[in-house]
Amino acid sequence: EAGVAQSPRYKIIEKRQSVAFWCNPISGHATLYWYQQILGQGPKLLIQFQNNGVVDDSQLPKDRFSAERLKGVDSTLKIQPAKLEDSAVYLCASSLDPAGDPYEQYFGPGTRLTVT
Amino acid sequence: GQNIDQPTEMTATEGAIVQINCTYQTSGFNGLFWYQQHAGEAPTFLSYNVLDGLEEKGRFSSFLSRSKGYSYLLLKELQMKDSASYLCAVRVKGGSYIPTFGRGTSLIVHP
């Protein structure tokens, strides 16, 4: 089975520029997550989608970050304008049912963003 | 929220056994996960515990004590490829059921 796909793998931008990341989850997975992982830390959830609806975006800095999953499959995460502290790896993950048991998230390879 | 604590770094010798501990403070506990993350790669699922006790899966075992807010990941017959970060994550009931990740434990296996 194909895994979670993300692009680009690497991105370098200057502060105040904008950037967008793309994610294609595993086929059939209704739930999609975006995480931010700063070097040396664990992943921090930014937003969770169930199909094309937002379930949790409490930790998304909404003044500069936005995300959408219009057709309930692919998703994009945008940062506008970027700050130096946004330098991190942005991980996309998907799962069948977050409340289910057993439960497992499948992560994509991530996009490493460097803001200079 | 959840407070999750794990050692920052551990070292061990190839062929040995290592135990990585994780302690947590939370209400409405609904499961604890262990993920492995190699440098520059995405986390991959290792184990999930929701009841007390030991879950064994090949060279890896995970233990949970809900009353103590404690878990450990046990790695046996260590191999060089086990050098990675090991993330403990805790899920609570209700809401979005999203696990909260700890900072991870960087394990270095040397010959």
Image (spheres, coloured by chain):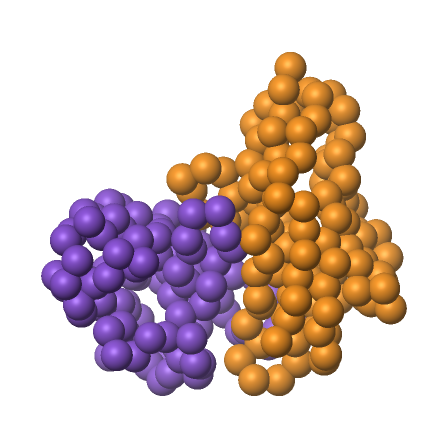
Chain colours: A purple, B orange
User: Total of numbered circles in the picture?
Assistant: 0
Relative image position of residue A47 (x, y in whole percent): 39, 74
Q: Position of residue B82 (x, y in %)?
A: 60, 31
Q: Nearer the viewer, residue A19 or A110?
A: A19
Q: Is A13 displayed left or right of B53 in the figure?
A: left
Q: In the depicted view, which residue is nearer to us: A104 or A76? A: A76
Compared to residue B72, the image places residue B65 above or below, namely below
Identify the image quadrant of the N terminus of chain B. bottom right
For the question of whether residue A3 can be seen, the reply is no
Q: A20 or A26: nearer the eye?
A: A20
Residue A70 to residue B5: above or below: below
Quarter of the image for residue B83 reads top right
Residue B24 in the image: x percent, y percent?
A: 72, 64
Vertical comparison of A77 with B84: above or below = below
- Identified at 56% across, 84% down, the residue is B95
Q: Residue at x 30, y 53 (%)?
A: A87
Q: Position of residue B97 (x, y in %)?
A: 58, 76
In the picture, measured across the screen, residue A72 lies left or right of residue B109, that is left
Residue pictured at 38% horizontal, 66% vertical: A34
Which residue is located at x 79 percent, y 64 percent? B69
Quadrant of the image containing the C terminus of chain B: top right
| Residue B60 in view of the camera | yes
